């Protein structure tokens, strides 16, 4: 059976284990059902997630011209402390920026390779944690806009990491941490503007991924250079496909690629 479409990040369902779905325009694939099966990936072309043209992807699924124009790729996406919608100031598209920024946001701790601090819209909990491959996570504050979440994250980054080591995450080279203890340690460093939004009584969320075999030495697949790859799928974690030969493929970082997926 063969499917073809443009890659976008896998949709997930919060169950034990997590359920993964690869969505194409006219089809979807329940990826959990492909575990322990041989699949082939073939690079077909590009399709920018904004303009839809067959142009090389620059970043985040967008061609270079769209990346520097669309509001979905503005700097405040990666650096929420740069948000300005609460000031009624436009960066690229004020209507879009108000819609995204002026809604409840969560500052959280997640443990994927190490404890890290992050920001997400409340509506994206626990999806954001799943996408990062975190096996445990906890909310610290819930604030009414993205700016407050951003300055809280910046303040806490002085005391805890904000990056995931993707290799350790995929190798499952991790240790359980008491995130309630971490939250208590960090609450004193929350900026004054966000202190009133501290969450004192919530508990950890634990996440189980469908992985039958973890790679010892993960090798990242470059689909554009390789053009074609075949292997046995043995795991799904974060937004990665994990194969038996230790090859891993990050769906999220390859958004905008048109691929053909064949099931042996």
Image (tube, rainbow, N blue to C red):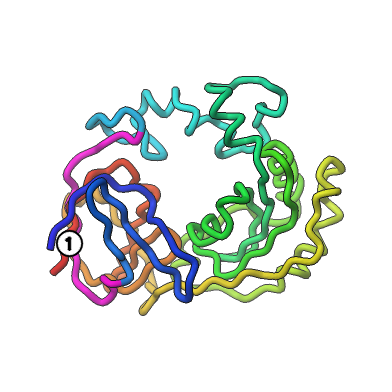
Please name the residue shown 73% across and 50% down the image.
142
Taking the image as shown, residue 147 lies to the left or right of residue 198, namely left
**Front residue of 93 and 150:** 93
Say which residue label 1 marks.
40
The answer to whether any part of residue 114 appears in the image is yes
Taking the image as shown, residue 212 lies to the left or right of residue 15, namely left
Vertical relation: 246 (above or below) 143: below
**135 within the magenta span:** no
Please name the residue shown 71% across and 29% down the image.
86
Please name the residue shown 69% across and 51% down the image.
107
| Residue 240 % position (x, y) | 38, 61
Residue 261: quarter of image: bottom left
| Residue 260 % position (x, y) | 17, 52
**Front residue of 10 and 73:** 10
Please name the residue shown 62% across and 69% down the image.
205
| Residue 24 % position (x, y) | 27, 50
Rate crowding at label 1 as few (under 14), some (14 to 19) or many (20 or more) other CA atoms within 10 Å.
some
The answer to whether any part of residue 219 appears in the image is no
| Residue 2 % position (x, y) | 13, 58
Which quadrant of the figure contains the C terminus?
bottom left
Q: Which residues are magenta?
A: 33-49
Count of labels shown? 1
Residue 32: quarter of image: bottom left
Vertical relation: 106 (above or below) 169: above
**40 within the magenta span:** yes
Q: Residue furthest bottom?
A: 212
Taking the image as shown, residue 248 lies to the left or right of residue 76, namely left
**Front residue of 217 and 240:** 240
Which quadrant of the figure contains the N terminus?
bottom left
């Amino acid at each position: 059976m063969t499917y073809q479409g443009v890659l976008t990040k896998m949709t997930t369902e919060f169950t034990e284990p997590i359920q993964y779905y690869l969505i194409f325009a006219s089809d979807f694939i329940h990826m959990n059902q492909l575990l322990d099966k041989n699949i082939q990936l073939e690079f077909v072309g590009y399709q920018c997630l904004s303009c839809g043209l067959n142009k090389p992807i620059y970043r985040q699924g967008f061609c270079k011209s769209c990346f520097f124009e669309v509001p979905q790729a503005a700097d405040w996406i990666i650096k929420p402390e740069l948000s300005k919608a609460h000031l009624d100031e436009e960066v690229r598209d004020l209507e879009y920026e108000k819609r995204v920024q002026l809604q409840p946001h969560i500052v959280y701790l997640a443990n994927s390779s190490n404890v890290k601090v992050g920001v997400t819209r409340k509506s994206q909990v626990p999806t954001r944690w799943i996408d990062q491959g975190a096996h445990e996570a906890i909310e610290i504050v819930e604030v009414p806009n993205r700016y407050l979440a951003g300055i809280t994250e910046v303040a806490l980054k002085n005391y805890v990491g904000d990056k995931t080591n993707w290799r350790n995450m995929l190798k499952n080279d991790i240790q359980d941490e008491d995130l309630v203890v971490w939250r208590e340690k960090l609450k004193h460093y929350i900026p004054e503007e966000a202190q009133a939004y501290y969450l004192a009584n919530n508990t950890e969320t634990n996440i189980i991924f469908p992985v039958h075999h973890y790679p010892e030495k993960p090798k990242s697949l470059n689909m554009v250079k390789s053009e074609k790859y075949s292997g046995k799928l043995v795991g799904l974690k974060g937004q990665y496909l994990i194969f038996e030969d230790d090859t891993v493929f990050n769906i999220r970082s390859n958004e905008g690629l048109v691929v053909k997926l064949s099931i042996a």
